Amino acid sequence: MKLWRQPFDAAQKATKLGQIHIDKERCKGCGFCAEFCPREVLRMSSELSPKGYNFAVVDDESKCLACGFCELICPEFAIKVSTPLDNNGS
Amino acid sequence: MTANLNVESQSIERYLRQDRLPHIWCSGCGIGIALDAFLRSIDRANIDPDKLAVVSGIGCAGRAAGYVNLDSFHTTHGRAIPFATGLVLGNPELNVVVFSGDGDLIAIGGNHLIHAARRNIDMTVICVNNFNYGMTGGQVGPTTPLDARTTTTPYGNFEPPFNLPYLASASGASYVARWTVLHARELERAIAEAMTKPGFSFIEVISPCPVVYGRMNKEPKGLDSMHYYQQRSIIRDGVDPKEANIELNGPIMVGKFVDIERPTLWDNLRQVSSKAREKVRTQAKV
Amino acid sequence: MENQALVGEFFMNGDEACAEGAISAGCRFFAGYPITPTSETAERMSMRLPQVGGVYIQMEDELASMNAVLGASWAGMKAMTATSGPGFSLMMENIGLGVMLETPCVVVNIQRAAPSTGLPTMVGQGDMMQARWGSHGSYEIIALAPISPQDIFDLTILAFNLSEKYRVPVLVMSDEVVGHMSEKVTMPRVAPEDLIDRPRPELGSDEYLPYKPNADLVPPMAAAGEGYHFHVTGLTHDERGYPVMTAEAQDRLVRRLVDKIRFNRRDIIKYKEFQIEDADIVVCAYGISVRIAQLAVRMARNAGIRAGLLQLITVWPFAEERIRELSSQAKAFIVPEINYGQMVLEVERCAGSRAKTILVPHMGGSVHSPQTILEAIREAAQ
């Protein structure tokens, strides 16, 4: 993330990162998660799921801040966002 | 958002009948989001899931009852609210939520809605409004905007729709709110608030219906409807519900419109009960 | 003074006696809508239920009433509604829901002359076939026909017991004359052993299947709020309660719902007989018509005709076997009913060609005169 100046305690604070788990079987390719993720972490794949949908995939997980909006906005209960158990550091 | 998403994710799964997923709703339909918000609100509101009962009617939204791992009742068209009334009166410890659609609750079920609101029966009604009868193929309904196209209004809808927050509020509901499914967080909070508040709570949830209503009204994908909500919804907490009309492609007012205190049906019934017993006591003395 | 059912001898009309019978049976929930000639039942319940710790609610229409009754039953209460023909028609879809969800409840119909608005304050017996077939689909239901205020008191208790035992709505098919006549009603103290409660689940919540039947084809019933987290639906469903859209599931479910009543009919079917043993002519009647038929049979006997009376207490399921038995002994069945021929069709079907079946109809508005029935008996005896 680009900052115009560094906060004094930048070294002590760590940004929470998220891990995205997408259930391909449940995803129906509506695109809400990819569209409304504030950091553009997700995109729709060009592959088809067994049900014939272009399912969502993670594009760049390093940008994920675990805000959880994709999980809320998914109508299929297909996305889970988790944070690494170790919350200090990366 | 709470810090540990792992715990939250697991909460949702235990309220779902995993063996029934994936559900039947179309790609881009918003009912799943509304259901998700409801399930999340259970823990947020500290509701005991063993005392929670869900009643639904017939229609796409009505199928929600079949996916929740709670005492749930999938009843007949339009009659979820009176069935729920029986549950509330039969066991005052139950927390009863009605989850159904605009056709079911407002057309065939309209009479029951206004009477339940009038009585201020302690229940929460989540009305998913996708502006048509989705399950049967996209016919016009009492919330379809004027001039909208549906399978039974091929020349455009010629009947003005209900303004649901106005209807609920005028009938006596003590909590009235409207959110779109894009406002997933606000919706979760609203449902939690409604479930904890005694009395009749009514939450209208605007949802895409891409395969029928959307396709016939320039919103062929769920994303098109979501963009419309993003661009045209306005949060107006506390505004007079009279202002909350929705016109075709017009602005959508969302927010919490009504939050008042009124005696509930049980408050009134308990008074009747003590009067009755007093009468029996005085008669016995004679 | 909680939970006090009335005990003693009283003078009251059928509508009121029905309400008291329900309270004696443990009914603590009534949802209804006013309708002539049944409003007195609602009025009495509105006064008595709060006295005994129950709930009376007047709903906005009969559809709401029937659904509130189902909801209250699923909350664990014994629940009832009461109506007449026009309301009965409105309740039909949701009586079907009650059958499909297997919900114990009692629906009382104090019949009046029909069709449509008809004669609201005057007697009819024209809803008998509707009681059996009024909702859509293949199903079986239990219907009882009381002949007096005392009888409606007793049969309402029986109705609750049957509805709990078989998890099915039970219809009390009374009529305006019984509803509005006042007679002595003796109300005994009803002990808990005399009352039947719905079968309850034994297993822990994880193993409970809402529609897995016991040996008598009746599944155990949990109530909402007990932690079982069950799902029930009006859609065709399997033992888990989940909707299953297949012909196989439909076959299994419909057969069980019907067989549940058919296989247990010996327990369910009740009738009374007067001077049947040597009867050539059997008068088959139900409800208020029984009392006129009794007189006609006595008059026939005095005139030397060997007539007898079969009183149907349970109208549905129909007493097929008894009619078949009697059809080899009797020359003819006389069926007086206050309609243009409903239960007579059942009698005719079961009697076959072995005996004649003669309808003595009355369109409604009053009861038969004994002479009309006597004439039919005389003619059949020739």
Image (spheres, grey):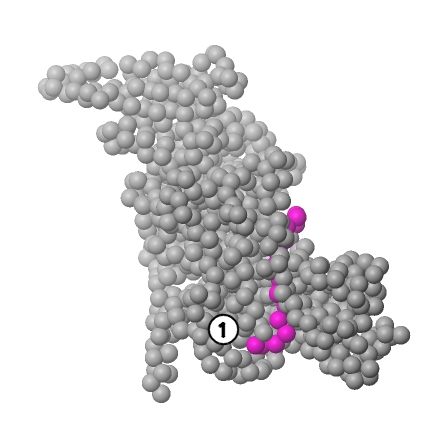
Residue A7 on image: x %, y %: 13, 19
**Is C176 or C139 nearer to us in this picture?**
C139
Residue at x 44% of width, y 16% of height: A44
Picture quadrant where residue C193 is located? bottom left
Position of the C terminus of chain C, as image quadrant, is bottom right
A20 lies left or right of B111: left
Q: Can residue B224 be seen in the rendering of this structure? A: no
* Residue numbers of the magenta segment: C136-150
Q: How many marks?
A: 1
C271 lies left or right of B70: right
Residue at x 80% of width, y 68% of height: C330
**Is C1 or C256 nearer to us in this picture?**
C256
Residue C148 covered by magenta stretch: yes
Q: What predominant SS class does the magenta segment belong to?
A: loop
Residue at x 43% of width, y 54% of height: C75
**Secondary-structure class at tag 1:** helix
Residue C346 covered by magenta stretch: no
Direction front: furthest residue: C278
Amino acid carrying label 1: it is Glu
Q: Which residue is mark 1?
A: C20
Residue B266 on image: x %, y %: 37, 61
Residue A6 on image: x %, y %: 15, 16
Residue at x 34% of width, y 17% of height: A41
**Is C85 or C250 nearer to us in this picture?**
C250
Q: Can residue C218 be seen in the rendering of this structure? A: yes
Picture quadrant where residue C150 is located? bottom right
